[in-house]
């Protein structure tokens, strides 16, 4: 409804992990390059770790687009609540490998045979598991066993594990030592700096068709950064609701007060960005402080986007 008023062709701050909107900060670019490199050089196992809402799934979707352009065979699993019996079912289904048997050994044989065939044809096979912080130890152990599918020189399947920092913690546990040792490359996503938040908001508006006078004043984007702490999902939420609310008053450029009200509505002000360590002084030390992460975790859990609603086309 606000689109006509602000001269936009589409909704700029959709919460879907749409790779068209991917904004490449240096960190994101490094992560994407790392993932591509890891796959191309058949490293076997790579991880992508980052806080809630910092763009892991969006990045993975861009990676999948790139892989599809290169005719790689991909399986994308995001139902991380699966048990170890279901893992192979899901993998076979995602790769479209027919198998009538439910026996694990039969399924593994089918998978191995199919992987060898792909290898002979020079095709790359990639298994991407998102939300991997929720995987149980037995499932992680099964995943490790998949890395045993190899020729004498190369891994037959490249595996990307993507998840929140709990995944990193999980991988530190002694029972997952063998899995940890197989991780050849670690990539990361992180919250945006203030400057990056400005560029991010401008970029999304531009992709959505914005032109002419600014839609958000510069001070308003500072306020967005203050309350979102640079987390893209929260930036989107603040921008989207601010657009809706400001449209009612036909406000352009949108003023900080509108964002402050939205932040209050979503209790983001409880993160207290004006506290002594907060406000414009937010820096990496604050991001890493335990109190901050705890607060942030609680606040963000209210805005979690469930990837099960994703309707992206695969294959
Ligand atoms: N670099 C980016 N460029 C463009 N949009 C981004 C970027 N990072 C995140 N977003 C946007 O922020 C929102 C959250 O991103 P995404 O779902 O990819 O985060 P996530 O790290 O996978 O979160 P979770 O830990 O909850 O799975 C999406 O709307 C996405 O479009
Ligand atoms: Mg995600």
Image (tube, grey):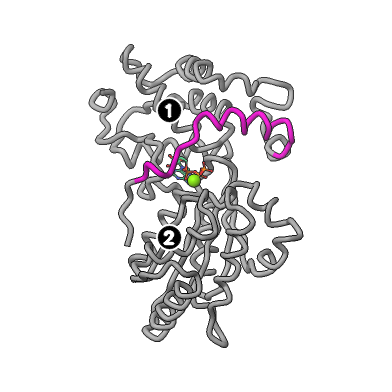
- Residue underneath mark 2: 90
Residue for point 44% across, 47% down: 23
Marks 2 and 1, how far apart at CA: 37 Å
Q: Which image quarter holds the N terminus?
A: top left
Residue 15 vs residue 182, the one in the foreground:
182
Residue 266 vs residue 311, the one in the foreground:
311
Residue 153 on image: x %, y % = 56, 86
Residue 114 on image: x %, y % = 40, 78
Position of residue 48 in the picture relative to residue 214 (left or right): right
Mark closer to the observer (2, 1): 2
Mark 1 secondary-structure assignment: helix
Residue for point 51% across, 56% down: 29
Q: Few, some or many C-alpha atoms within 10 Å of disc 1 (few <14, some 14-19, many ≥20)? A: many
Residue for point 36% across, 45% down: 310
Q: Are marks 2 and 1 in contact (CB under 8 Å)?
A: no
Residue closest to the far top = 249
Residue for point 55% across, 63% down: 34
Q: Is residue 222 magenta?
A: no
- Residue underneath mark 1: 239
Res 177 → quadrant: bottom right
Position of residue 102 in the picture relative to residue 50 (left or right): left
Position of residue 48 in the picture relative to residue 259 (left or right): right
Residue 312 on image: x %, y % = 33, 50
Position of residue 307 in the picture relative to residue 133 (left or right): left
Q: Which image quarter holds the C terminus?
A: bottom left
Mark 2 and mark 1 lie on one chain; the one further toward the N terminus is 2
Mark 2 secondary-structure assignment: helix
Residue 39 on image: x %, y % = 50, 70
Magenta stretch: dominant secondary structure: helix
Region of the chain picked out in magenta, as a range:
288-310
Q: Is residue 307 magenta?
A: yes
Q: Few, some or many C-alpha atoms within 10 Å of disc 2 (few <14, some 14-19, many ≥20)? A: some
């Amino acid at each position: 409804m606000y689109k006509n008023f602000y001269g936009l062709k589409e909704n700029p701050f959709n919460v879907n992990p749409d790779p068209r909107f991917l904004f490449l900060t240096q960190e994101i670019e490094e992560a994407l390059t790392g993932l591509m490199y890891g796959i191309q050089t058949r490293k076997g196992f790579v991880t992508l770790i980052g806080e809630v809402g910092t763009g892991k799934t969006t990045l993975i979707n861009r990676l999948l687009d790139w892989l599809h352009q290169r005719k790689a065979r991909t399986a994308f699993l995001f139902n991380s609540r699966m048990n170890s019996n279901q893992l192979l079912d899901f993998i076979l289904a995602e790769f479209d490998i027919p198998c009538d048997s439910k026996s694990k050994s039969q399924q593994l044989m089918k998978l191995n045979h199919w992987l060898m065939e792909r290898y002979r044809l020079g095709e790359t096979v990639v298994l991407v598991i998102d939300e991997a912080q929720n995987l149980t130890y037995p499932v992680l152990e099964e995943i490790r066993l998949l890395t045993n599918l190899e020729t004498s020189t190369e891994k037959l399947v490249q595996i990307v594990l993507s998840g929140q920092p709990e995944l990193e913690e999980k991988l530190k546990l002694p029972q997952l030592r063998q899995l940890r040792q197989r991780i050849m490359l670690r990539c990361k996503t992180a919250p945006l700096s203030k400057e990056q938040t400005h560029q991010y908001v401008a970029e999304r508006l531009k992709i959505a068709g914005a032109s002419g006078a600014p839609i958000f004043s510069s001070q308003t984007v500072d306020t967005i950064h203050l309350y979102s702490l640079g987390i893209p999902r929260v930036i989107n939420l603040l921008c989207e609701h601010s657009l809706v609310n400001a449209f009612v008053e036909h406000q352009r450029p949108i003023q900080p007060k509108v964002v402050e009200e939205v932040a209050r509505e979503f209790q983001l002000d409880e993160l207290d960005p004006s506290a002594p360590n907060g406000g414009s002084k937010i820096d990496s030390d604050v991001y890493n402080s335990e109190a901050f992460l705890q607060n942030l975790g609680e606040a963000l859990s209210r805005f979690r986007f469930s990837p099960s609603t994703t309707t992206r086309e695969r294959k």
